[in-house]
Image: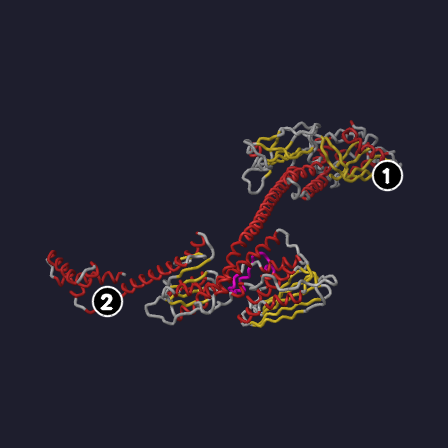
């Protein structure tokens, strides 16, 4: 074989073979190749030179191993792979250069050199010594044979790619993803449980986090003691020493504070085997001025803590901080929910106790009132009959509210348990509807009933069904100003369907989902009929207790239809319903329906003297309006009663009163709106306005007075106190208007005098006004001025008049 290169002699020198730019080629040219197993460059074979010229220009990190010793030649891109092994790696045998990984890569090279096939290895972990420590790296590389002219393998092409960043990035991303699956809900101690779950996840990432521990402030984990604000308590650790302890067991809180605002600092390493460096990362939680704890992260001894590693630690810290924040928020909400549940239970107990306590005085009240009402005949005075009737209706209404509160407390406690008994539901429903006949006639409504009698009795809780029917029909009559109320009952083989339809004001779509909520009232209905928002919620509760539901179909101005559907369970054959299906205890259907209009028209006196005080009374409750009218008329005042703000404004425009006494809660515009309207007009800006309200408390009083009210009276009130306050404001208003009128008259008279009298007369008049004296005294004062100043009297008079005119002009 021609070792000189087929007659080219010394033309293939090192300078020529390794010609080109780059620091690597420069070193290749300066290398003493004669001292290597390859010998001088001039003696290299054609195949070796060809392989070198293939490797050097490649942009891929490429290494050429040649000969039995696998002597190394590589390009500039491969130099960056070598780290501190460069430049010694040039011409160095592969086994010597890569001694730390030769057990992994040596067999692959020998396989290729022995005539085997090329190899390809992907994401191979290799621990390299190239930066002064054993470094965890990952590589994708291939070994390809290079043959000589005889077909024997003379060398190996090594094409390699450093995939360490990709592998580590994916691995760390998976750790962050797993941290994202940690739950902060459930368990007796969500905060500690979440922290321990975090360290378990980090424990599965031992190559990146060979050691992890979470310390939290003692007060955050519910600790106590004098040092509660000083020490951090270990709540979870992984990668600890063999005896299972992580030391130190406590870290002074000052160490956490010291590291705020800058990169995580170092902490003295614990007694671990492999970890020689840890990072102390403060856990910052929104709403806390100081860190709530510290995350201790062990740094892998096989990776430098570079920017990528630091970024990973910061992301882990941020994720743990978020989990702790969520756990604290969950604990807060759980404690808040427990407190609300306890408050709700206390409210239910309160309703039960108060409702039961109300029953005794109500019994003592209703009995005598009923007896008194029956003994009061036509010969009794009309005002006495009306007062007794109003008191009886109010007591009945109070009894209904007490019953509703009892049912509400049972519903809240889950104690609405139906007691089914054989019932003629058709007859029972018809009886309930008939109880509203007089109320419908009084309100000018047509009450229609379409009752399917069915094929026999059914198993049903009579009391619940009665309450459903009474509540729905009562609401329909209450909120229907004209037209009709229709009640229909259908019985099929599987269910009872009750529908109550009215032609009333209707309910807006946005309100319909809430009408069955506790204590919710649809203000837009604006009937002024009162109510506390219990009735419809109880209808829903009763329907649910009976195994059914209630639906609503409504639109403003079109009316409403409430439909109740419950299962129909036939009573056993041969069983007859109770002898009477009349609703027990329902002598008067619902007090609020009867109160739509007063039982007797309020007598309004037509004897309106010129000196009588006129009071405009604005109150939507008929009985209370009648009572207040009688109370005020007994004082000799004229009273004009109206039911809403719009009527009140029309009345003020037509016949201005001397005082307005108005309730705040009115249908449509409330009493505050009426007050603002009156204060905005010059003609009524000084009109006394006294407000009535059911809201007690200093805050409510101040609120009413801030809106311009002259006084604020809380219901229930003492009649004598109300009369006294109204009288005081009437008298103060009269005095104020009298003074204003007299002042205006005096000013007018003075101006007339100035315009019509002589200069002396004008001066006398001005002096009278200035010194509040009579004419003789004023004249004497002017004469005294004249004598003292030795000036004629008419000149003094002219000076006084001129000064007054100048002052008037300046104004």
Look at the numbered disc 1 and give the secondary structure of its residue: loop
Give the overall secondary structure of the magenta segment. loop
Magenta stretch in the rendered image: 513-530
In the displayed structure image, the side of residue 166 where residue 609 appears, left or right: left
Q: How many marks?
A: 2
Pick the quarter of the image with the N terminus.
top right
Magenta segment includes 564: no
Identify the residue under disc 2.
749
Residue 651: x and y in percent read 42, 69
Name the image quarter holding residue 492. Answer: bottom right
Q: Residue 70 versus residue 174: which sits nearer the camera?
A: 174
Residue 625: x and y in percent read 45, 64
**Local crowd size for mark 2, using a 10 Å CA cut-off: few (<14), some (14–19), many (≥20):** few
Identify the residue under disc 1.
117
Look at the numbered disc 2 and give the secondary structure of its residue: helix
Of discs 2 and 1, which sits in the foreground?
2
Q: Residue placed farthest to the front in the image?
A: 375
Q: Residue placed farthest to the right in the image?
A: 150
Name the image quarter holding residue 53. Answer: top right
Q: Is residue 462 above or below residue 336?
A: below
Q: Residue 606 versus residue 326: which sits nearer the camera?
A: 606
Magenta segment includes 529: yes
Residue at (17% x, 66% y) in the render: 761
Residue 132 makes an appearance in the image: no
Residue 810 makes an appearance in the image: yes
Residue 609: x and y in percent read 34, 70
Q: CA distance from mark 2 to mark 1?
A: 130 Å
Q: Residue 323 versus residue 772: which sits nearer the camera?
A: 772
């Amino acid at each position: 074989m021609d070792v000189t290169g087929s007659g080219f002699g010394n033309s293939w020198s090192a300078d020529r073979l390794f010609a080109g730019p780059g620091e690597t080629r420069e070193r290749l040219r300066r290398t003493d190749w004669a001292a290597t197993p390859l010998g001088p460059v001039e003696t290299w074979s054609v195949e070796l030179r060809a392989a070198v010229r293939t490797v050097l220009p490649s942009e891929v990190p490429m290494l050429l191993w040649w000969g039995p010793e696998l002597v190394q030649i590589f390009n500039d891109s491969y130099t960056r792979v070598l780290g501190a092994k460069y430049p010694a790696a040039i011409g160095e045998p592969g086994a010597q250069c890569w001694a730390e990984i030769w057990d992994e890569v040596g067999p692959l090279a020998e396989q290729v050199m022995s005539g085997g096939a090329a190899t390809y290895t992907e994401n191979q972990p290799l621990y390299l010594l190239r930066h002064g420590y054993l470094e965890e790296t990952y590589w994708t590389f291939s070994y390809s044979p290079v043959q000589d002219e005889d077909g024997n393998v003379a060398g190996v092409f090594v094409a390699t790619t450093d995939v360490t960043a990709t592998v580590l990035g994916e691995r760390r991303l998976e750790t962050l993803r797993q941290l994202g699956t940690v739950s902060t809900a459930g368990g007796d101690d969500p905060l500690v449980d979440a922290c321990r779950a975090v360290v378990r996840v980090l424990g599965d990432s031992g190559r990146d986090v060979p050691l992890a521990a979470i310390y939290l402030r003692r007060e955050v984990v519910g600790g106590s003691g004098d040092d509660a604000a000083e020490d951090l308590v270990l709540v979870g650790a992984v990668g600890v020493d063999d005896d299972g302890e992580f030391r130190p067991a406590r870290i002074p809180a000052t160490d956490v504070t010291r590291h705020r605002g800058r990169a995580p600092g170092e902490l003295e390493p614990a007694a671990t085997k492999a970890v020689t460096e840890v990072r102390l990362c403060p856990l910052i939680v929104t709403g806390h001025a100081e860190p709530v704890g510290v995350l201790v992260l062990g740094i892998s001894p096989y990776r430098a803590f570079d920017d990528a590693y630091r970024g990973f630690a910061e992301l882990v810290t941020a994720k743990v901080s978020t989990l702790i924040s969520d756990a604290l928020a969950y604990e807060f909400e759980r404690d808040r929910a427990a407190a609300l549940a306890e408050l709700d239970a206390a409210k239910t107990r309160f309703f039960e106790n108060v409702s039961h306590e109300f029953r005794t005085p109500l019994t003592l009240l209703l009995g005598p009132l009923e007896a008194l009402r029956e003994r009061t005949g036509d010969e009794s005075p009309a005002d006495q009959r009306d007062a007794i009737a109003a008191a009886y209706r109010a007591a009945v209404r109070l009894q209904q509210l007490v019953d509703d509160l009892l049912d509400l407390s049972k519903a809240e406690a889950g104690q609405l348990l139906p007691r089914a008994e054989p019932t003629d539901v058709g007859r029972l429903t018809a009886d309930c509807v008939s109880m509203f006949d007089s109320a419908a006639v009084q309100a000018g409504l047509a009450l229609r009933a379409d009752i399917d009698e069915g094929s026999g009795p059914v198993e049903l809780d009579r009391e619940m069904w009665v309450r459903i029917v009474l509540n729905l029909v009562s609401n329909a009559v209450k909120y229907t100003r004209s037209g009709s109320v229709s009640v229909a009952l259908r019985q099929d083989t599987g269910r009872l369907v009750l529908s109550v339809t009215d032609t009333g004001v209707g309910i807006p779509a946005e309100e319909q989902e809430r009408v069955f909520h506790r204590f919710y009232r649809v203000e837009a209905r604006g009937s002024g009929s009162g109510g506390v928002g219990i009735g419809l919620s109880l209808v829903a509760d009763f329907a649910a207790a009976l195994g059914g539901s209630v639906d609503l179909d409504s639109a403003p101005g079109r009316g409403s239809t409430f439909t109740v559907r419950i299962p129909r369970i036939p009573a056993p054959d041969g069983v007859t319903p109770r002898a009477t299906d009349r609703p027990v205890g329902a002598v008067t259907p619902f007090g609020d329906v009867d109160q739509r209009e007063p039982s007797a028209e309020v007598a309004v006196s037509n004897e309106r003297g010129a000196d009588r005080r006129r009071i405009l009374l604005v109150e939507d409750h008929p009985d209370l309006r009648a009572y207040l009218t009688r109370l005020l008329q007994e004082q000799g005042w004229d009273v004009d009663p109206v039911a809403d703000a719009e009527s009140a404004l029309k009345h003020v425009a037509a016949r201005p009163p001397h005082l307005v006494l108005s309730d705040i809660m009115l249908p449509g515009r409330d009493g505050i709106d009426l007050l603002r309207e009156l204060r905005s007009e010059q003609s009524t800006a000084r009109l006394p306005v006294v407000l009535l309200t059911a809201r007690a408390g200093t805050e409510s009083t101040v609120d009413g007075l801030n809106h311009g009210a002259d006084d604020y009276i809380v219901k229930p009130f003492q009649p004598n106190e109300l009369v006294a306050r109204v009288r005081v404001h009437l008298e103060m208003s009269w005095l104020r208007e009298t003074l204003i009128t007299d002042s205006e008259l005096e000013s007018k008279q003075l101006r007339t005098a100035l315009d019509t009298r002589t200069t002396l007369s004008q001066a006398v008049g001005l002096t009278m006004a200035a010194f509040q004296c009579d004419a003789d005294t004023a004249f004497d004062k002017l004469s005294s001025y004249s004598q003292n100043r030795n000036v004629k009297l008419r000149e003094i008079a002219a000076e006084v008049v001129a000064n007054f005119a100048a002052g008037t002009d300046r104004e």
